[in-house]
């Protein structure tokens, strides 16, 4: 892979961003070799046998995980962002990398070809059964879908609608020892007009179709309102349903248990915030290591940063799970900040999800997602071109802002504090420059960006802010600065805990000048803010024009 000269110089001067290209991670089930990467802004592995939470300091909401042999796999919600259903891999539950997306196109395509904020793929569940990987995921407007594969890093089957209906969410398949198959679900009041219920359906043995009308096995209205996100397990003759309750930002984690699959179920709070600052710790997965240790992965809602993933030690006391640290021994744990790494029999190198991208391959890296089902005409994706070419694709005539624009290429915020910088060259074809622009975007319900564009006076950089974009508001140009040519470096510096953003630009890649006003990143609908790139045109001008993004780098905020 060719490496650009300015990339090398940047590494030499900053001494921070590390790509360990000589380590190759060879995984089973047909995964290709991948270069290990170490983030410049967040590493959960402390390198001394301990880890710090969150193990994934990015918006991998509603996580579910399994172990297959010596490998761990995690999936999370993706909503309208595509490709969807990210699949992450780890060897030790601490060091993770994105290896695939199980859903390449969201159906019905006529709907999901345009952004559907807050809709699409809600909390999924991954299982390994009969030598195949299964993912069950809900679309709250259509029902519960299933996809499967024998190659977790390869192609997944087309979605099968297992249980049609509105407001059916959070599926958890379960194959019992007697061969019977079940599906546990929760309910979204926004569509089903009822919630706080856990319902159990029977399925055919193939897991492709629900075969009865379902039975409610737990009602949380009295003691545990908003119970949802069930995960169904069996241990020591007990059936367990791990479920969060109390709401995303201030809730707790429940365990339900019964000797009979249909109950009655006893309920116990097995983890809450306690004396920590980890709000609403819940919704996740119990995983057992090769050495017999139990661990629990869950999320914490951090507003503009999304729902980040924590790893908690878990033990069993009198056939009840206790999650996290339990200093008073009452059976209800609280999240840990630092803890000894899981015993998986071996020690593995540090690895983190990719953030920076040099665009030396034919496609953007796996950290990137579009706002809707992708179209081939949005990007050139030419092998070995050394850059990412985004075309000035026209937005719809009735779009007052970027909220309904699908061709925004974005990634999750990777840490509380970081900078994101990109080098972009805007190409104007046939001297038709009106309304064609490209830039660096911090996307959410409020959003802000830096763009490069051209008018009859030449090239300029603009800071633009849009408040309450979902309401159809128009953009405000805060400040504009003239530049000498079509190439510019654009940067946003993000500082926690409030995700305050400061934008700057440079014409030489060394001296950055501030532009515009301070901006506070805001979440999108059910997801955190996202950062990335775009190239657009208004629909009323002649086609043509594109932007070449040479690279996109995420670095420590103090790297200069």
Image (cartoon, rainbow, N blue to C red):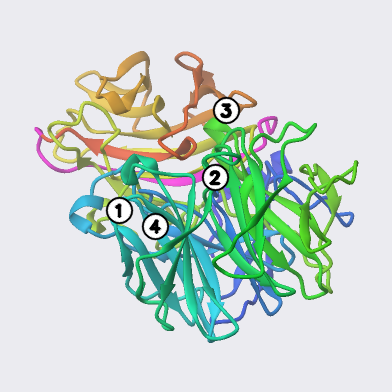
Q: Earlier in the sequence, mark 4 or mark 1?
A: 4
Secondary structure at badge 3 equals strand
Label 3 neighbour load within 10 Å: few <14, some 14-19, many 20+:
many
Q: Earlier in the sequence, mark 4 or mark 2?
A: 4
Mark linked to residue 467: none
Q: Earlier in the sequence, mark 1 or mark 2?
A: 2
- Residue 398 location in percent, x, y? 14, 31
| Residue pointed to by mark 1 | 379
Residue nearest the viewer, comparing 430 with 58? 58
Asked if residue 210 is positioned above or below residue 522 in the image, the reply reads below
Mark linked to residue 220: 2
Name the residue at 39% across, 57% down.
Answer: 138
Query: Which residues fall within the magenta stretch?
Result: 540-560
- Residue 450 location in percent, x, y? 40, 27
The N terminus is located in which quarter?
Answer: bottom right
Q: Earlier in the sequence, mark 3 or mark 4?
A: 4
Marks 3 & 2, CB-CB < 8 Å contact = no
Discs 3/4, front: 4
Secondary structure at badge 4 equals strand
The quarter of the displayed image where residue 361 is located: bottom left
Discs 4/1, front: 4
Mark linked to residue 138: 4
Residue nearest the viewer, comparing 293 with 464? 293
Q: Is residue 396 left or right of residue 15?
A: left
| Residue pointed to by mark 3 | 493
Discs 4/2, front: 2
């Amino acid at each position: 892979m060719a490496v650009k000269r300015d990339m090398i110089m940047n590494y030499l001067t900053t001494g921070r961003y590390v790509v360990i290209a000589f380590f190759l991670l060879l995984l089973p089930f047909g995964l290709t070799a991948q270069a290990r990467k170490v983030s410049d802004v967040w590493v959960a592995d402390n390198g001394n046998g301990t880890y710090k939470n969150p193990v994934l300091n990015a918006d991998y909401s509603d996580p579910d995980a399994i172990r297959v042999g010596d490998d761990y796999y995690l999936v999370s919600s993706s909503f309208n962002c595509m490709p969807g259903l990210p699949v992450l891999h780890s060897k030790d539950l601490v060091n993770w990398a994105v290896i695939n997306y199980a859903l390449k196109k969201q159906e019905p395509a006529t709907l999901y070809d345009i952004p559907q904020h807050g809709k699409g793929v809600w909390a999924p569940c991954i299982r390994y059964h009969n030598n195949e990987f299964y993912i069950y995921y809900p679309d709250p407007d259509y029902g519960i879908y299933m996809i499967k594969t024998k190659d977790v890093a390869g192609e997944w089957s087309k979605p099968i609608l297992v249980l049609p209906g509105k407001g059916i969410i959070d599926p958890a398949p379960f194959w019992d020892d007697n061969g019977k198959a079940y599906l546990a679900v929760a309910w979204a009041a926004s569509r089903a007009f009822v919630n706080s219920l856990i319902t159990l359906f029977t399925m055919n043995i193939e897991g492709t179709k629900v075969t009865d009308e379902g039975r409610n096995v737990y009602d949380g209205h009295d003691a545990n309102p908003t119970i949802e996100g069930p995960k169904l397990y069996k241990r020591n003759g007990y059936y367990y349903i791990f479920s969060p309750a109390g709401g995303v930002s201030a809730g707790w984690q429940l365990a339900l248990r019964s000797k009979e699959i249909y109950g009655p179920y006893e309920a116990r709070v097995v983890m809450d915030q306690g004396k920590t600052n980890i709000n609403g710790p819940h919704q996740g997965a119990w995983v057992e290591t090769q050495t017999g240790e139990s661990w629990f992965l869950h999320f914490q809602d951090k507003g503009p940063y999304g729902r980040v993933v924590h790893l908690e030690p878990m033990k069993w006391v009198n056939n009840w799970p206790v999650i996290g640290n339990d200093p008073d021994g009452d059976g209800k744990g609280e999240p840990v900040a630092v803890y000894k790494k899981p015993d998986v029999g071996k020690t593995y190198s540090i690895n983190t999800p990719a953030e920076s991208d040099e665009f030396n391959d034919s496609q953007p890296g796996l950290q990137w997602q579009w706002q809707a089902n992708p179209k081939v005409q949005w990007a050139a994706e030419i092998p070995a071109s050394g850059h990412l070419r985004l075309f000035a694709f026209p937005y719809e005539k009735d779009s007052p802002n970027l909220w309904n624009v699908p061709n925004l290429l974005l990634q999750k915020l990777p840490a509380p504090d970081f900078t994101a910088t990109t080098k972009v060259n805007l190409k104007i074809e046939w001297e038709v420059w009106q309304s064609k622009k490209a830039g660096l975007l911090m996307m959410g319900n409020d959003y802000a960006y830096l763009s490069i564009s051209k008018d009859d006076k030449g090239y300029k950089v603009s800071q633009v802010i849009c408040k309450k974009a979902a309401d159809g508001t128009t953009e405000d140009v805060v400040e504009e600065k003239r530049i000498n040519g079509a190439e510019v470096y654009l940067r946003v510096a993000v500082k926690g805990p409030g995700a305050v953003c400061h934008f700057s630009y440079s014409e030489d890649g060394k001296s950055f000048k501030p532009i515009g006003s301070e901006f506070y990143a805001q979440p999108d609908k059910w997801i955190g803010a996202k950062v990335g790139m775009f190239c657009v045109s208004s629909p009323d001008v002649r086609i043509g024009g594109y932007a070449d993004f040479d690279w996109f780098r995420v670095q420590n905020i103090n790297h200069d």
